[in-house]
């Protein structure tokens, strides 16, 4: 698998609501099919650790 | 109020299920956490290189979001909250528990669709779909 390069993340301060809204609006879009696929992958991985308590 | 956005919720917003910025008008600070970072990376497409390229462009942008760390304190809190849910008969996904641990440690409100999981851990979350749209835990 190729290396995934992440940006340096600012940890000192969260985005304000307005900053987040503006930033989110400018994101590159996955497109419907890929967004559906990734969401499904993430949901399956999370649900993999769901179970029934004793 | 400061908000921790569940990674799965962000992807549901990317799917166009709701307009995410609408929830942020009165929010002082918005965060993701490192549990979400791991979930994003784990969920990337596997087979199609074209899809992976598009996903990487998306992730390079998304990774600019401020992310709270999964340190020892956060993991211990996550474990305690997950145990609390088990005492009530629920086994919550680890991803939910880690988000809950970080949020509880830092005093953040969690924005999520997995409402019942967080309630089982004693966390009252925000559901951006609102009460008219119940959580859809099993759906894609």
Image: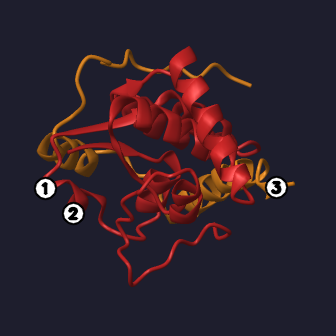
Using a 10 Å C-alpha cutoff, classify the residue at mark 1 as few (fewer than 14 neighbours), some (14 to 19) or many (20 or more).
few
- 2 and 1 marks in contact (CB < 8 Å): yes
Residue B133 in percent (x, y) is at 44, 80
Q: In the figure, what tint was chain A given?
A: orange
> In the image, is residue B132 above or below residue B112?
below
One can see residue B41 in this view: no
Q: Where does label 2 land, which residue?
A: B22
Q: Residue at x 22, y 23 (%)?
A: A13
Q: Secondary structure at mark 3?
A: loop
Q: Quadrant of residue B55?
A: top right
One can see residue B78 in this view: yes
- 1 and 3 marks in contact (CB < 8 Å): no
Question: Which numbered tag is attached to residue A27?
Answer: none
Q: Residue at x 38, y 79 (%)?
A: B131
- 2 and 3 marks in contact (CB < 8 Å): no
Question: On the rendered image, what quadrant is the C terminus of chain A found in?
Answer: bottom right
Residue A53 in percent (x, y) is at 82, 55
Find the residue positioned furthest to the front: B87
Say which chain tag 3 marks: A
Q: Are marks 2 and 3 on the same chain?
A: no
Q: Which chain is red?
A: B
Tell which of A1 and B15 is nearer to you.
B15
Residue B107 in percent (x, y) is at 32, 36
Q: Secondary structure at mark 1?
A: loop
Q: Are marks 1 and 3 on the same chain?
A: no
Q: Secondary structure at mark 2?
A: helix
Q: Residue at x 36, y 19 (%)?
A: A9
Tell which of A48 and B42 is nearer to you.
A48
Question: Which numbered tag is attached to residue B25?
Answer: 1
Does residue B114 appear left or right of residue B21 in this picture?
A: right
Q: Gap between marks 2 and 3, in whole Å?
A: 36 Å
């Amino acid at each position: 698998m190729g290396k995934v390069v992440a940006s340096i993340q600012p940890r000192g301060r969260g985005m304000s609501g307005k900053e987040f809204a503006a930033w989110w609006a400018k994101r590159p879009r996955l497109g419907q099919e890929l967004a559906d696929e990734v969401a499904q992958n993430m949901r399956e991985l999370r649900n993999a650790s769901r179970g029934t308590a004793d | 109020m400061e908000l921790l956005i569940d990674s799965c919720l962000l992807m549901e917003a990317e799917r166009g299920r709701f307009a995410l910025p609408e929830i942020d008008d009165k929010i002082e600070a918005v965060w993701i956490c490192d549990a979400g970072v791991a979930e994003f990376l784990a969920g990337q497409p596997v087979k199609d290189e074209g899809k992976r390229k598009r996903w990487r462009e998306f992730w390079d942008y998304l990774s600019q979001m401020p992310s709270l760390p999964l340190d020892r304190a956060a993991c211990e809190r996550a474990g305690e909250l997950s145990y609390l849910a088990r005492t009530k008969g629920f086994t919550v996904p680890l991803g939910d528990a880690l988000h809950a641990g970080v949020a509880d440690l830092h005093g953040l409100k969690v924005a999520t669709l997995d409402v019942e999981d967080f309630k089982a851990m004693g966390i009252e979350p925000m559901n951006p779909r609102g009460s008219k749209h119940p959580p859809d835990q099993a759906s894609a």
